[in-house]
Image: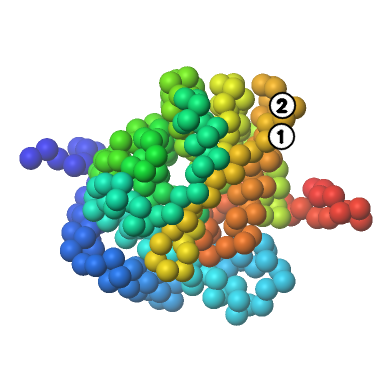
Amino acid sequence: MKRSWDEDDNIADKVLYALIMMLGVLVRSISRKHSTAVAYVIGDFLYNVLKMRRPLVENNLALTFPEKKNSEIKAIARQVYRHQAENFIEVLRLPMIKTAGDAARLIDIDALDFLAKTIDRNKGVVLVSAHYGNWELMAHCIGLLMAPLTLVVRPLKNHAVDRQINRWRSMSGNRIVYDGQALREGLRALKNREILVLLGDQSDPVGGFSTEFLGRSSSVFLGPAYLALKAGVPLFVGMSRRDGKGLYSVDFQEIDQTGLGTTKTDAEELARRYTKVLARHIYQHPEEWFWLHNRWKLPWTRPFSKSKNGTTIS
C-alpha cells in the first residue's frame, strides 16, 4: 500500500491525517441529518470549550457590525463555528456525491445567465467565490451538474491531508491548480474555454493593492481580475448559501467590465467591483463566512469612514 504522507511529515501530521480519515469513515456511515448533528457538537466544542480564535472572530464581527448588540455578535459567532464544522464534515462526505442526481438533491443552482454567457457560447470564464457557505461542496456539485472546473487552491501544510482533499475535489472531474501556478495554468484554462475558479476574499501578503472590504481597507489579490481582462472572458461571482432546510442555493452574478482594458488600473477597478459583491453577500448572511481567518492582520489595514457627501474615504 502506498504511503499517504511524505518522509518529512512529522508524527503530529500523520496522527492528524489518521484521525481525519477515521472521522470520514464515521460520518459516511451515518445519515446526513446525524452527521450535521455531529458537526454542531464539534462547532459548539470549538466555540464554548476550546474557544479557538473566538476573540478574533467576535472582534471582527463587532467591528463589521457596530450596530449589533454583544448578544447578537455571540449568536452569529456560534453559528459561524457550527457552519465551519458542518463544512468540514461535508467535505468528508464528498465521496458519497457520485452523480448529478446526488448533487441535485443537495444544491439548487440558478445558472441560466451564467450558462448563456459562458458554456453555451463555448467560452471560458473566471468564477470568483469566497470562503462562504460551503465552497467545496459547491465546486464539487457544479462539476457534476454543469461542467468540470479548474480550481485554484493553496496547498495545505499537511501533505497527506492536502493530497486526500485534492483527490476528493477531483472526483467530479475538477482539475486542481496550486496558486503558485495560477497565472500560467489559469490563462491556459481560459484559452481552452474552461471555468476557472478562484477565491477572492483572501488577503495578498505582498499588499500591492488595497480596497474597502467589510468596512476596512484590505489587501486584495488582483489575480482573478487580471486573468479575466487578459483572456477577454466574463467574470462572475458565484456564492453558495444554506437555505435553512438542509440544502444550498447557488447564485451567480456577472461583474460588469464596461470601460476596462488590460492595465493594472483596470484590474484594480474590476477587483473593487467583485469585492463589493462578495462583501454584500457577507453583510446579508455573516454566519456563512469564514471569520476564523485573520483577514486584517496586515499592518496597513485600517477602517474606512464616510465623508459628508456619503463617499467612502480612507
Q: Disc 1, disc 2: CB below 8 Å?
A: yes
User: Label 1's element?
Assistant: helix
85 left or right of 68 in image: left
| Residue 186 placement (x, y as % from top left) | 47, 26
43 left or right of 223 in image: left
Residue 279's place in the image compared with 156, above or below, is below
Q: Is residue 39 something one can see in this rendering? A: yes
16 left or right of 211 in image: left
Q: Quadrant of the N terminus?
A: top left
| Residue 233 placement (x, y as % from top left) | 57, 26
For mark 2, does the 10 Å Cα neighbourhood hold few (<14), some (14 to 19), or many (20 or more) residues?
few
Residue on which disc 2 sits: 260
Task: Indicate the quadrant where residue 310 lies.
Answer: bottom right
Task: Indicate the quadrant where residue 234 lies.
Answer: top right
Residue 131's place in the image compared with 229, above or below, is below
Q: 62 and 120: which one is in front?
A: 120
129 left or right of 94 in image: right
| Residue 61 placement (x, y as % from top left) | 61, 65
Give me the residue at 71% from left, 26% from top.
260
Residue on which disc 1 sits: 269
Q: Is residue 50 something one can see in this rendering? A: no
Residue 6's place in the image compared with 181, above or below, is below
User: Label 2's element?
Assistant: loop
- The amino acid marked with disc number 2 is Leu
Which label's residue is closer to the chain start, 1 or 2? 2
